[in-house]
Amino acid sequence: MSWHQIYDPFNNMAISTVFAALPVVVLLGTLGILRMKAHWAAILGLITALFVAIVFFRMPLSMAFATAGFGAAFGILPIGWIVLNVIFLYQLTKEKGEFQVLQETLTGITNDSRLQLVLIAFAFGAFFEGAAGFGTPVAVTAAILIGLGFSPLQASGLSLIANTAPVAFGALGIPIITLSAVSGLDIHDLSSMVGRQLPFFSVLIPFWLVWAFAGFRGMIQVWPALLVAGVFFAAPQFLVSNFHGPWLVDIVASLASLAAVTIFLLKWYPKQIWGLNGHDEEATCRACHGYSTGQVVRAWLPWVILSVLVFIWGLPQIKSYLDGVWLYKYPIPGLNNLIMRVPPVVMADKAEPAVYMFNILSATGTGIFIASLISAILMGYSISETFRIYLRTIRMVRFSLLTISAMLALGFITRYSGLDATLGLTFAKTGFLYPFFGTLLGWLGVALTGSDTASNVLFGSLQRISAEQIGISPTLMASANSAGGVMGKMIDAQSIVVASTATQWYGHEGEILRYVFFHSIALASLVGILVFLQAYAFPFNLMVVK
């Protein structure tokens, strides 16, 4: 028997909104204020979500628990599978001393930690976002930064801040592709519109990132390199998104930025160098690390293999082929197509599918796992040594996997019970100010679900409906959902747990949340202001795709 979602169970939207927000308040409050361990905060948030959904929003008990199980399974595969295998590769390289070689050869480009941060967290991380998404860039870049000497808080928080501007075009454009499907708007129009919003922030993020790390004075000292990094990311991001589509935006932009900064730093360096352990007075010479070419190649080879395989695994043709070999679709009993979203969230009653895809072959984590095994062979590990390190890695990340599962279970409950829609409808009542608050709705969606794709699924249709009612471009507001959502990526609990696991700082998620929260809300507000200007103000409204 089907169940229709209820968005205002108290017949008072203000009270209904307060109760809908309770799971998020409990999760973030226990994590950021009470400083609980992440897995306990996630479990309490999940219990709260189940209670509110069942008791107040009248979600059937069986559906609520089936939804929680569905979300928990999704937390293990694909998300947890990525985290486990990235940490496995890191442990392999660390045990053999190859990571130390990689760390020291990075000074061959620059020994300034501010510029290493931009190269790794911003440019290199954007490549992984474009190729795979789903936590891969934060896991990889945070692990590298911690190995370079950044503190766990810095490595975690700065990786999260850097992983923003590329997110809307992540995983070969999946968020935009999904947004087009749920909103009914043209995919090229959406790609073009997001490509006229995010490039402003692609230029800004390198400056913001270094300011968060080194302060204003430290940022000003390296502004030429930051400008190169931002412009050479933003220009391809605009061009590819507007004249090709969403598929290769991040890949092209990240490689262009990485190459441009590397070439620039061969000719330029700041007067004051920020070393790993403080401030050096002079720049050290390039490639003075003392390692042979063979040693450098061996140190970088695992990460090159990882990059290549992650890119290959992200190609639609490869995914389709691997899914054709083995893809198990499991419709969740008592849940699949039995929950109905109703107007005004959608134009007409719409059944919510609930099919778990056990796609172990095409999962990004499998590509990372294979890269790790190849690297283990090349580094001379025996089968028993490799197995021992893998078991040790599983033990290391066990609480992280539990936390990620609980977080995803909470996010799925929020979606299938309609709590998310109640929050969204409240945002939609802001009238003239809707372009600003609608953008923050995208931010909220990613903060709740950990995914720009999921946020677009939740609110893409609502954004179109609300925009048409107010009389502004539906393409603008649907795109704003994705563009605003990218700034919520740094505070979603799933990403924070991925970062804390990658830096082996599990248990300090509350500190990471407090570190990034201001940056998240400030940047999301700036996106909201831009969208507001694009809706109403000349000449910004000339950028809008009608």
Image: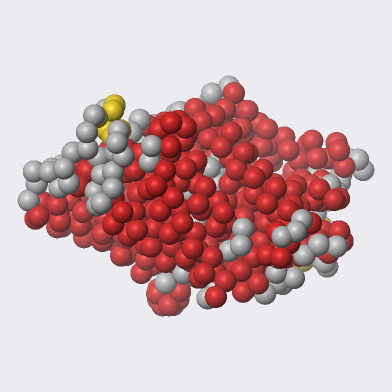
Residue under the image location 24 percent in, 48 percent down: 109
Q: Quadrant location of residue 361?
A: bottom left
In-image side of 74 versus 466 (left or right): left
**Whole-percent x and y of residue 331?**
60, 65
Quadrant into which the N terminus falls: bottom right
Quadrant into which the C terminus falls: bottom right
The foreground one among 208 and 454 is 208
**Whole-percent x and y of residue 362?**
41, 67
Residue under the image location 68 percent in, 51 percent down: 530
**Whole-percent x and y of residue 83?**
39, 48
Q: Is residue 48 above or below residue 135?
A: above
In-image side of 43 versus 251 (left or right): right
Q: Is residue 510 above or below residue 95?
A: above
Residue under the image location 79 percent in, 56 percent down: 536
- Residue 367 in view of the camera: no
- Residue 260 in view of the camera: yes
Q: How is the image coloured?
A: secondary structure
Residue under the image location 51 percent in, 31 percent down: 515
**Whole-percent x and y of residue 49?**
69, 40
